[in-house]
Image (tube, rainbow, N blue to C red):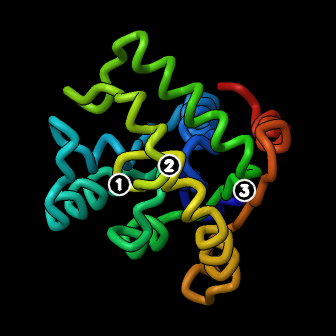
Amino acid sequence: MTTTSSKPRVIVIGNTCAGKTTLGMRLAQRLSLPFIDLDALFWQPHWQPSELTEFRKRVLEATGAPGWVLVGNYTAQQQDISWARANTVVYLDVALPIVVSRVLLRSYRRWRSGEVLWGTNYERFFPQLKVWDENSSLVAWAVNHHRERQRAYAAALRDTRWQHIEFHRFGSSREADGWLTTFPSR
C-alpha cells in the first residue's frame, strides 16, 4: 500500500460475507486507523435505510479524517465520495459457494445469539431461506448480484477516475490474510 502524501485510506469491497468487515477491522487495528462500516452509516432502526442525503453526509464526515479503513459497497450511493478520497481499494472476490455458506452460517449465528446490528437491528435467519426474494434473502441477493459485481469491480480497476488508487484483488481469505501480514503491528 503506497501512501505518499498521507495516512492510508483503504476501502474493502466485495460480495456480502466475502470477509470485508473481518479484514477491515484487522487492518484498521494493525494500522491504528479508524474503522468505518458503511452498513452502520446506512441502516437506521428497524432496518430502515437512511435518506440518501443523510447517508452521503455521514460518509463525507467519516472519510474526512487523514486516515481510515472503510468497508462496504453502496457504490451507486457514495462511490464518488469515498473512492475519490481513498488511496487503496481491496476487492475480496470470494467464490460464490463460500459466500452463500457464510451468509447462512453468519445469519444463523447472529439470530441465535440475538446479536444487535447497527443500533437496534437484529438478524432474521428464516428470511435468508427465501431464495426467490432478494429483498428478504441475502443468499438470493448474493447469487443474483455476484457476476454483476465482478464485472463492475473489474471495470472500476480500469477506470481512469480511480487511477490514483492502488488496487488489490484477493480470491480467498487466505490471500487477504497474507497481504495483511505485510503490515507491521503497531
Query: Which kind of residue does numbered mark 1 sit on?
Result: Asn
Who's the residue at 54% across and 57% down the image?
6
Q: Is residue 158 above or below residue 94?
A: below
Name the quadrant of the C terminus: top right
Residue that carries the numbered disc 3 in the rendered image: 93
Res. 98 in view: yes
Direction from residue 155 to residue 177 in the image, left or right: right
User: Who comes first in sequence, dot 3 or dot 1?
Assistant: 3
Task: Pick the residue in front: 21 or 147.
Answer: 147
Who's the residue at 29% across and 32% down the image?
118
Q: CA distance from mark 2 to mark 3?
A: 22 Å
Q: Quadrant of residue 56?
A: bottom left
Who's the residue at 56% across and 31% down the image?
104
Query: Which kind of residue does numbered mark 2 sit on?
Result: Val
Residue that carries the numbered disc 1 in the rendered image: 135
Label placed on residue 131: 2
Res. 10 in view: no
Name the quadrant of the N terminus: bottom right
User: Who comes first in sequence, dot 2 or dot 3?
Assistant: 3
Question: Which percent across, then down, holds residue 34?
Answer: 44, 38
Question: Which percent across, then down, holds residue 84?
Answer: 46, 73
Q: CA distance from mark 3 to mark 1?
A: 22 Å
Direction from residue 179 to residue 167 in the image, left or right: left
Numbered disc 3: secondary structure: loop
From the image, state whether disc 2 or disc 1 is nearer to you. 2
- Neighbor class of circle 2 (other Cα within 10 Å; few <14, some 14-19, many 20+) is some
